[in-house]
Image: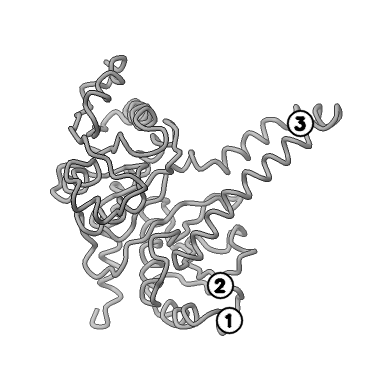
């Protein structure tokens, strides 16, 4: 298993990608990593890793596609960037997966124009795992496709179903459609047109899911257009931070609360871990012809290691192949 890592992307690059790569290499003995970036910057960061150095290949990628430039133009013109080199190596089967915390737009554009979509998939989608109290659900799409057609949402459900089967090991994932009401007739034109199509799709469609039920373990895959999905994602991230902050403030408010907090500290630590995005890793880019994971821009080393682990599970879970099989099953003449 060889994973291509963009070492220059993200708020904490190159330290976080390098630290995460080393952590992943020590966790997965059969793993090899292609670490891409400015070689003069990367080589000094690898001076104390003799135990895993033989499984690291440095790739010279001096160009960086930033968040302040056009992703499509960046992918077209910066051919020596980690995004372009990595996507092409993944396409040519030189590596098994790709991980980056860099520009989301560049990862999406690279996946579409350098790696390529799975034949039959209209739009690739970003799909992060989110906590629901009992485990995680997959939110798809969370921002790659702001304007959607009904057939896009149907395919999002198909791709999310494939991911939860292949990576999370669920035999028959429940797929829901985010809406303002549970009734079939509720919603805007997009979700009204999508509902009957999802009823006919080759997966376990459980109907509309209201916002208040998103974290209620009523579905394993929650489908939305990228606009609504991004609102859900950002709101949940902000709410988690706010609630943890309120709890910490109130625990420190008086002596009795401090004593109770000390006793409940292990429980609070578990809650924090469950709500922490760094434990998940990143959002897979589903619908392209390879295992691509977009790590959070502010990922630390551990988060990056988890993102690499996520890419490994995508490869081992045959996610791309499952999506292809479901597309074939969905054809009218199948």
SS type, badge 1 = loop
Q: Pinpoint residue 151: horizontal percent, then vertical percent.
A: 36, 76
For residue 42, which quarter of the picture? top left
Q: Which residue is mark 2?
A: 179
Query: Residue pushed farthest front?
Result: 68
Of circles 3 and 2, the one toward us is 2
For residue 305, which quarter of the picture? top left
Side of 124 where 197 appears, left or right: right
Tell me whether circle 1 and circle 2 mark residues in contact (CB < 8 Å).
Answer: yes
Q: Which residue is mark 1?
A: 186
Locate the N terminus by quadrant. top left
How many neighbours does mark 1 have within 10 angstroms: few (below 14), some (14-19), or many (20 or more)?
some
How many neighbours does mark 2 have within 10 angstroms: few (below 14), some (14-19), or many (20 or more)?
many
Q: Is residue 137 above or below residue 328?
A: above
Q: Which residue is mark 3?
A: 261
Of the numbered discs 1 and 2, the one sitting upstream in the chain is: 2
Q: Is residue 1 visible?
A: no
Of circles 3 and 1, the one toward us is 1
Q: Is residue 192 visible?
A: yes
């Amino acid at each position: 298993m060889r994973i291509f890592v963009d070492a220059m992307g993200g708020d904490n690059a190159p330290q976080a990608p390098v630290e995460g790569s080393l952590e992943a290499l020590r966790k997965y003995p059969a793993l090899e990593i292609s670490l891409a970036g400015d070689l003069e910057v990367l080589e000094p960061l690898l001076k104390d890793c003799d135990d895993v150095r033989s499984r690291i290949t440095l790739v010279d990628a001096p160009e960086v596609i930033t968040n302040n430039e056009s992703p499509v133009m960046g992918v077209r013109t910066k051919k020596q960037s980690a995004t372009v080199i990595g996507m092409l190596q993944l396409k040519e089967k030189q590596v098994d997966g790709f991980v980056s915390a860099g520009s989301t737009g560049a990862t999406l554009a690279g996946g579409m124009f350098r790696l390529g979509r799975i034949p039959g998939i209209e739009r690739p989608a970003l799909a992060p795992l989110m906590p629901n109290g009992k485990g995680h659900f997959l939110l798809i799409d969370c921002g790659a496709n702001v304007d959607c057609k009904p057939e896009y949402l149907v395919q999002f459900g198909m791709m999310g179903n494939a991911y939860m089967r292949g990576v999370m090991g669920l035999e028959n994932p429940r797929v829901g459609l985010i809406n303002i009401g549970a009734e079939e007739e509720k919603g805007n034109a997009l979700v009204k047109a999508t509902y009957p199509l999802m009823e006919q799709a080759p997966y376990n469609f459980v109907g509309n899911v209201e916002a208040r039920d998103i974290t209620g373990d009523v579905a394993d895959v929650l489908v939305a257009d990228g606009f609504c999905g991004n609102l859900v994602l950002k709101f949940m991230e902000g709410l988690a931070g706010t609630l943890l902050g309120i709890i910490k403030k109130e625990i420190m408010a008086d002596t009795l609360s401090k004593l109770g907090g000390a006793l409940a500290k292990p429980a609070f630590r578990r809650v924090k871990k469950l709500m922490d995005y760094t434990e998940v890793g990143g959002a897979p880019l589903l619908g392209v012809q390879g295992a691509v994971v977009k790590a959070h821009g502010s990922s630390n080393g551990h988060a990056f290691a988890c993102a690499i682990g996520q890419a490994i599970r995508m490869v081992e879970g045959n996610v791309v192949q499952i999506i292809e099989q479901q597309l074939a099953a969905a054809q009218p003449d199948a």
